[in-house]
Every structure is written in structure tokens, then in C-alpha cells.
Image (tube, helix red, strand yellow):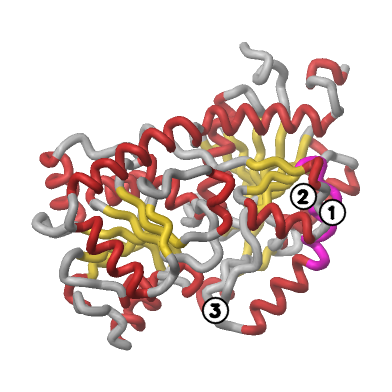
């Protein structure tokens, strides 16, 4: 056993949602739990659920507190309202843990876990995933600001380490009081075996047939929530006869409404295909079935879908945001474009028309992902940080 994995750490991971609920943060936490467990860490996840339960899921203890998800269904705000058992369970598992690792400051699970950690004097590590998220509702924006100014500020000032994914989120965390010397840049990991390049044209044809996709077109994939900040409507408007658009995610109603408004650009609504919300295996197949990944988002910097697309070896087109600066990407091989419909359409047409360029972009993307986004390396960084948080300068074995 290596120095990194020696000892039996007990870690409480905290996340508002967890699979089978689909989403970026919950996928990250699920992967962290899996790889930490493989490295010898005892992991408990505190999250929301349809009922109160404690289950063993592939060696990970998952503690679910019953929650109401009406805000997600009715207002497209992924904010579960958890039941009265939340704080009690948070205190129980914070007392059990050596370290509490809270993912994002915005959610009730995070507030309860932070309170529980303070009550039990358990050290806290935080990962801040996003800045303020654009939403059509001004009220939602005000609530975000209020939450981050209070609970967010408390978490950033309490955590012994704050992980951030890009320079924008780092600046946001510093603005909430995170101390620069306690902050670390830590990209999300990717399962580079699951999210792999298509082997050949025969495999791609088979995957397209299984997913009901056309065989005779260059296909551009969008994956994620159909929200304005993700840019799904801009991609629809950039539709063109030179390529077909494939959408994976939801909610379906948002895509249907956009198509009904005639947003589908020159390609028309008939060239738009909706795959639904996909699990990891089917999502990996969707990347292999397509030729280009496009995400014209407003305020993200290296979201998980871009990493998955790169690991899958397809060309990537996304918005030129400052959050990508820390990653030192070759801009000839990952296309970072100005965020407007015509620029997006022109760039997609250029890439769609040149299979050699697509191949070069895909090869670079795959090599970059394998080198930079391996989950075992990510887990090792976490373990080292947890040990430092427990007792700075000491390993778990030194705790007696």
C-alpha cells in the first residue's frame, strides 16, 4: 500500500443530489466516492432522496434524507428541500468522520453538514463548483446572492482547504472569504476507460443505429441541462444543414418549447434529435456516436461534459471563458469561440466540413484528458488534503 493510501480514513462526502439523479456535481461525488473507496478510504455520502435510507452501494455507505424536489420540477432550480432528519443525520455522520468534504455552498445539505462539523469539531474541506448561475428568474438570482453571502461565506472561511475548478470560481471563492493560501486548483476527473474514443467507423455505425441516429451526417452533440446559461438555445439557433444536432439531458419541455418558437435555425427542427437523460454508459456511447461536442455556455469553465467529450476523443467547441485559462489548452485543438450564434455556426461548419481537423482535435483532446483528468490521481490529491486537514503535517497513522 502506498504512502497516500496507507491508513483508514473515514470521510463524509456531502452533496445535494447523488445518482441515480443525473447531474454534474452528483456525478463527480459518485466518482470520488468510488475511487476513494478503491484507495482504502471508508466513505459515507450524505445526500437527498425519495425516502430516508442508509444503503451500501458498491462499498460506499449512502445516507439519503427524504426531500421535496418541487423547485426542480416547477422552476428548473435543482434545490431539494430536505426533511427534519437532515441535521440529526449530519451530526451523526460528522461525528463518525475524520473529515467532512462539502460540495458547493449553496444547498441545504451543505449548511447542515457545516453546522454538524462545527458542533462535532470535525475538519471541513470544500469544493466550490460554480459561481453565480444565470437564471431567467430575478428572484432566483437574489436568493443565490443571499445564500452565498451568508452560508457560502461561512463555508469558505471555515474550510481548511477549498478546491476550485477554474480561475473564475477561485476568484468567486476568494470574494467569499476563502484564504488564497488554503485554496487549490483541482480539475474533476474522468473515467477514461468508459469515456473512450470510438474504435472505427463500424463501431460508430453500430452505436448510431442503437441510439437511432442518422448514419450519413456529421453530428454535433450537446449534453447537460437545458438552461439558458448552458447555451442550448443558442446552439439550436446555430443549427445548419451542414450538420445535425443531438441533445442529451433535460428537461425535454425546454427543448420542445424552444423548437415551437422556431429557434432551430437554418437546419430546421427536423434535424434536431433528442436522446433523453442518459446514464453514464449511454452517455459515453452518445459521445462515440457523434463527431463534435458543442457547449456555448455563459459562465462555466471546464464543466464535466467538456472533459468527458475530450476523453471520448471528439472535437470540442465551447465558449472562450476566462475559466479555461488555468488549463493551458492548445486553442488550435480545442475551439474556444466568442459567444454569439453566427460565430458558433461558422466554426461548427468549418469543423464539420474537415474530417482531418476533427481527427486532429479529437486526438489532442484524448491525450490531454488521459494526462490531466485521471480519477486515481484526483483521489490521491484528496487523500493527501484530508490528512493535512485532520492534523496539519501529520498522517492518519500519527493520530494515535
Q: Classify 10 Å Cα crowding around label 2: few (below 14), some (14-19), many (20 and above).
A: many
- The number of discs equals 3
Residue at the spot of label 1: 115
Tell me the distance, in whole angstroms, between the alpha carbons under discs 3 and 2: 27 Å
Tell me the distance, in whole angstroms, between the alpha carbons under discs 1 and 3: 28 Å
- Magenta span: predominant SS is helix
Q: Classify 10 Å Cα crowding around label 3: few (below 14), some (14-19), many (20 and above).
A: few
Mark 1 or mark 3: which comes first in sequence? 3
- Quadrant housing residue 342: bottom left
Please provide percent x and percent y for residue 208. 17, 51
- Could you say whether the residue bearing mark 3 is in a helix, strand or loop? helix
What's the residue at 28%, 86% (across, down)?
Answer: 262
What's the residue at 36%, 46% (across, down)?
Answer: 333
Q: Classify 10 Å Cα crowding around label 1: few (below 14), some (14-19), many (20 and above).
A: some
Q: Magenta stretch: residue 6 in it?
A: no
Marks 1, 2: nearer the viewer: 1
Instruction: Determine contact: label 1, label 2, CB under 8 Å.
Output: yes
What's the residue at 77%, 41% (across, down)?
Answer: 161
- Could you say whether the residue bearing mark 2 is in a helix, strand or loop? helix
Please provide percent x and percent y for residue 361. 31, 44
Which range of residues does the magenta coloring cover?
149-161
Please provide percent x and percent y for residue 230. 46, 67
For residue 192, above or below residue 320: above
For residue 357, above or below residue 267: above
Q: Nearer the viewer, residue 344 or 237?
A: 344
Residue at the spot of label 2: 90
Residue at the spot of label 3: 75
Amino acid at each position: 500500500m502506498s504512502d497516500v493510501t496507507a491508513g483508514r480514513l473515514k470521510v463524509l462526502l456531502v452533496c445535494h443530489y447523488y445518482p441515480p439523479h443525473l447531474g454534474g456535481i452528483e456525478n463527480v461525488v459518485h466518482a470520488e466516492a468510488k475511487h476513494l473507496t478503491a484507495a482504502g478510504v471508508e466513505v459515507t455520502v450524505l445526500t437527498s432522496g425519495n425516502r430516508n435510507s442508509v444503503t451500501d452501494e458498491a462499498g460506499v455507505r449512502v445516507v439519503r434524507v427524504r426531500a421535496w424536489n418541487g423547485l426542480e420540477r416547477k422552476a428548473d432550480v435543482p434545490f431539494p428541500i430536505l426533511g427534519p432528519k437532515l441535521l440529526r443525520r449530519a451530526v451523526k455522520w460528522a461525528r463518525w468522520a475524520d473529515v467532512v468534504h462539502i460540495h458547493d455552498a449553496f444547498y441545504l445539505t451543505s449548511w447542515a453538514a457545516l453546522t454538524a462539523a462545527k458542533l462535532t469539531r470535525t475538519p471541513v474541506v470544500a469544493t466550490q463548483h460554480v459561481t453565480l448561475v444565470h437564471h431567467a428568474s430575478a428572484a432566483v438570482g437574489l436568493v443565490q446572492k443571499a445564500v452565498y453571502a451568508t452560508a457560502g461565506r461561512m463555508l469558505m472561511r471555515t474550510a481548511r482547504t477549498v478546491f476550485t475548478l477554474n480561475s473564475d470560481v477561485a476568484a468567486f471563492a476568494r470574494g467569499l472569504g476563502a484564504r488564497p493560501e488554503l485554496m487549490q486548483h483541482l480539475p474533476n476527473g474522468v473515467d477514461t476507460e468508459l469515456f473512450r474514443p470510438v474504435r472505427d467507423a463500424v463501431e460508430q455505425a453500430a452505436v448510431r443505429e442503437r441510439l437511432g441516429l442518422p448514419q450519413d451526417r456529421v453530428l454535433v452533440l450537446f449534453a447537460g441541462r437545458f438552461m439558458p446559461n448552458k447555451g442550448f438555445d443558442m446552439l439550436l439557433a446555430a443549427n445548419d444543414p451542414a450538420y445535425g444536432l443531438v441533445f442529451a439531458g433535460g428537461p425535454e419541455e425546454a427543448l420542445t418549447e424552444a423548437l415551437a418558437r422556431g429557434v432551430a435555425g437554418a437546419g430546421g427542427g427536423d434535424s434536431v434529435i433528442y436522446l433523453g437523460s442518459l446514464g453514464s454508459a449511454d452517455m459515453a456511447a452518445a459521445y462515440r456516436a457523434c463527431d463534435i461536442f458543442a457547449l456555448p455556455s455563459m459562465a462555466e469553465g471546464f464543466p464535466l461534459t467538456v472533459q468527458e467529450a475530450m476523453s471520448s476523443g471528439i472535437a470540442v467547441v465551447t465558449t472562450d471563458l476566462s475559466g479555461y485559462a488555468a488549463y493551458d489548452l492548445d486553442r488550435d485543438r480545442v475551439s474556444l469561440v466568442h459567444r454569439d450564434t453566427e460565430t458558433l455556426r461558422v466554426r461548427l461548419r468549418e469543423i464539420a466540413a474537415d474530417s482531418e481537423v476533427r481527427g486532429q482535435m479529437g486526438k489532442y483532446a484524448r491525450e490531454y484528458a488521459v494526462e490531466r483528468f485521471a480519477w486515481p490521481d484526483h483521489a490521491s490529491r484528496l487523500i493527501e488534503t484530508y490528512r493535512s486537514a485532520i492534523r496539519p503535517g501529520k498522517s492518519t497513522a500519527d493520530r494515535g
